[in-house]
Amino acid sequence: MSNNLLLGKNLLITGVLTDDSLAFGVAREAQLQGANVILTGFGRGKRLTDRTARKLEPVPEVLELDVTDPEQVKALIDELRNSVGEIHGILHAVGFAPEACLGDDFFAAQWPDVATAIQVSTYSLRTMADIALELMPPGGSIVGLTFDATVSWPAYNWMGVAKAGLESLNRYLAKEMGPKGIRCNLVAAGPMRTIAAKSIPGFAAFEEEWTKRAPLGWDVNDSSGVAKTTMALFTDLFSHTTGSIIHVDGGYHSIGA
């Protein structure tokens, strides 16, 4: 594959905490394709992002972004407008659910916990769209990460509900932003052994099931397929694709019970 598919493009990438983050793999692949990558971090987690950013070459800038804080969103837009002018691609890799929203007891979570999960994991895609509307020219692309929300999963619980909302929001944003020439798609990744996955009780069961049943097989430690697909969605290789969910799961989603 050519090494300049994203040459001259500015990409804003959220969700890089450690080098096993899906977002880190996307950032690295985008750099290999010539993109100028800008990362975001939040609060105490930003120190992790700053440290992990040093494993990329060139080392990208890391900007502060709390997706629940409108003032920080506005400040980020102003900073990007002054520094790079335009953003050609945005990766939404933001997700969080309080402990009560995950595990064996679906009814344990109360509305404040559920509201937090939905605000951070779902509504934040709309926040990315707000940034795009300010800074993204026609031909730009928003890509989000999901975990197939067409079915219920053990222990995933309210995060699964939040992901279902994300998948619906993706379609509505595609409808609203299409006339402006901006695409919005999701990548449904299979289970990966990331810091986020480790917070899900019973994650090992996902690993075993996926490895057994995915037609192409599955390696929970290899996110390269997810990174390459996501990178491709930022290019004009998918210039007429929007409102879609691309599965990168070894084909697991296609197999019945």
Image (cartoon, grey):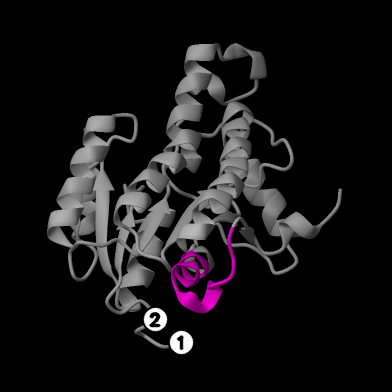
Q: Is residue 245 above or below residue 118?
A: below
Front residue (pair 155, 76): 76
Q: Residue 237: say if magenta.
A: yes
Relative image position of residue 188 (x, y in whole percent):
60, 54
Q: Amino acid at mark 2?
A: Leu
Distance, label 2 to label 1, CA atoms, is 9 Å
Mark 2 neighbour class, 10 Å CA radius: few under 14, some 14 to 19, many 20 or more: some
Tell me the chief SS of the magenta region: helix
Tell me: 203 left or right of 35.
Answer: right
Q: Position of residue 91 (x, y in %)?
A: 40, 55
Q: Residue at x 55, y 11 (%)?
A: 110
Question: Mark 1 — residue?
Answer: 1
* Disc assigned to residue 34: none
Q: Which residue does the image show at 41% across and 42% down from the upper left?
A: 94
Residue furthest bottom as drawn: 2
How crowded pointer 1 is (Cα within 10 Å; few <14, some 14-19, many 20+) is rated as few
Q: Which residue is mark 2?
A: 5
Is 16 situated left or right of 207 in this image?
left
- Give the quadrant of residue 42: top left
Residue 190 visible (yes or no): yes
Q: Which residue type carries mark 1?
A: Met
Q: Where is 11 relative to 46, above or below? A: below
Query: Is the residue under label 1 in contact with that under label 2 (CB below 8 Å)?
Result: yes
In percent of the image, x 22 and y 35: which residue is there?
A: 72
Residue lying at 39% horizontally and 63% vertically, measured from the top left: 25
Q: Residue 220 placed where, x, y %?
A: 55, 56
Look at the image and tell me whether residue 182 can be seen: no
Q: Is residue 98 left or right of residue 106?
A: left
Question: In the image, which residues are magenta?
Answer: 227-242
Which of discs 2 and 1 lies nearer the camera? The answer is 2
Q: SS for tag 1?
A: loop
